[in-house]
Amino acid sequence: MKKALIVLSAFLVVAGMSFAGGQSDQSAATGPRELTIFENLWYNTSVSVPTLAETPLYKEAMKRLNIQVSWIHPPQGQFDESFNLMIASGDFPDMIYRGWNGYPGGPEKAINDGVIVPINDLIEKSAPNLWSHLKANPQWLKEAKTDSGTLYMFPFIRGHDDLMVFFGPQLRKDWLDQLGLERPETLDEWEKVLVAFKEAGLAEYPLTFTKFNRGRGINGPGNAFIQPFGTTWDFYRDDSGNVHFGPYDDQFKDFLTFFKGWFDKGLVDPEFFSNERKTFDAKILNGDVGAWTSYTGSGIGAYLDANGGKGTFDITPAKYPVLQKGDTPFFGQRDNAVPGNTGMAITTQAKDLELCAEWGDYPYSEEGHVLFNFGIEGESFTWVYDYPGFEGQKFGKYTDLMMNNPEGKTLAQMGGLYTRAFYSGPIIQERQYIYQYAHRPAQREAIQIWAQTDAAKHMLPPITATPDESEELAEIMSEVQTYREEMVVKFITGQEPLSNFDQFQSRLKQMGIERAIEIKQAGLARFNAR
């Protein structure tokens, strides 16, 4: 994908764009300007307010547009359950924000089920700001529609390449310095570092992860220690565009053999497959481990914040590892421009489609883009022209209210009150936010070095299965995923001999993994033809 240079000046030159946010004639004629929206309340927002309606961001947006919005937020951690109950009840709000790839059968199925509506004509007619951006950025348009060409949401769009990379390997920098070690690049160098940490008595088990479904597992974004072997934990594509399922590859055995060696040497936390997030965080902050994989913000930033500058605790990012010095990592964490088909859709029970379009389109206007990425001028941000790295450019700099909050709120918590840039939303995420959220040198370096992989070549774009394929795929993968996790743990811990890997592959074949690969391949072909 071509690098999308979405900075503030770009909003001034998109031809035909409307920045108006006024009242639609139809809305004025039909009654109150009110909407209801179902969406998750981000954790960092929820610690301050019970609903988005009480955030400064949305108070300002509702005032500017003269639209009153009521939000329905599911309890923390219960989005899917609450969403399913809502669908079963048949009682829908006007709009729903979610990742539509997560809907059983995908967005086409949600349309066929009578949950949401196609909005091609509505966007062209009544959402001029979003439509202008989609026309100007063909890759965004390609990712935001279904295989049949249907537009169905006001999407969350990562507006720059710098926003697509945010996860990777991390180490205790102070430990490296103490032992006179350089940051490792190859797996051999990684082993030397981990052995040194262990032999120096700094950590009994120097490398840790969370359990598989907690985001920072050995299978976490980027597959840091799996990808050196030319495979991944899940589906990927090779250089010829053929889809593979990593654990079904012969080279997955090479990964298991290698990692079992580390496990047997005591270099890996024996609880790597069962750690909850809180346990994982505690091991890092308590100095029980020296290496892990995590995020720029909730990893490097959060751990340095929590440490509070005490002692010599310091963190450095490391490149995704390779087998041979100078090689480019096969894979790494990288997001799509429209990740997970995430966006705000209009339901079949929406009372006023024009009003929904007016609300949905506003964040894509120049004025809305500023509000939803920076907040309120003079309160949460000010304009400067001398921000490091952006000299001479108009830059929305967060104020001390955000960066050094007098009430002790973190930057993430303040970002959750004044913006949608810090998590996601029906917006074009602005690059300038990340250079303040990830303001430490280690975080900025992480973004640059974690991007140095071939992930863009090998990751799957946001493909979708047909409703029938989706049902078949879900049935296959529910069994495959459970079996994969169970057997990976057994192979690494020695409960199952690696000589049985061919039996593992045979069982995956019996479960239908080759049919699952066919479905993914068909989805990729349809995506490429969009």
Image (cartoon, rainbow, N blue to C red):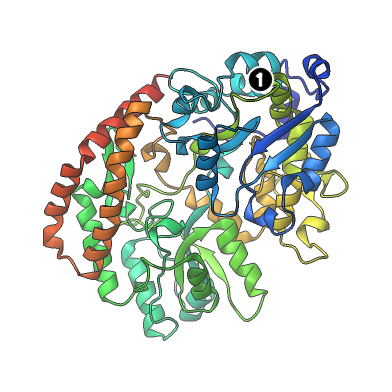
Count of number-bearing discs: 1
Q: Residue furthest bottom?
A: 201
Quadrant in which residue 393 is drawn: top right
Q: What residue sits 44% from the left and 33% below the top?
A: 462
- Towards the viewer: 286 or 166: 286
Give the position of the C terminus as an image quadrant. Answer: top left
- Please state which amino acid type lies under the numbered disc 1: Ser
Local crowd size for mark 1, using a 10 Å CA cut-off: few (<14), some (14–19), many (≥20) = many
Mark 1 = which residue? 132
Residue 82, percent from left and from top: 55, 45
Residue 426, percent from left and from top: 64, 35
Residue 112, percent from left and from top: 46, 22
Q: Residue furthest front?
A: 89
Q: What residue sits 37% from the left and 50% below the top?
A: 329
Q: What residue sits 58% from the left and 34% below the top?
A: 343
When the figure is inspected, residue 62 is found, relative to residue 208, above or below; the finding is above
Q: Identify the element where label 1 is drawn.
A: helix
- Towards the viewer: 521 or 267: 521
- Please indicate, yes or no, whether residue 221 appears anywhere in the rendered image: yes
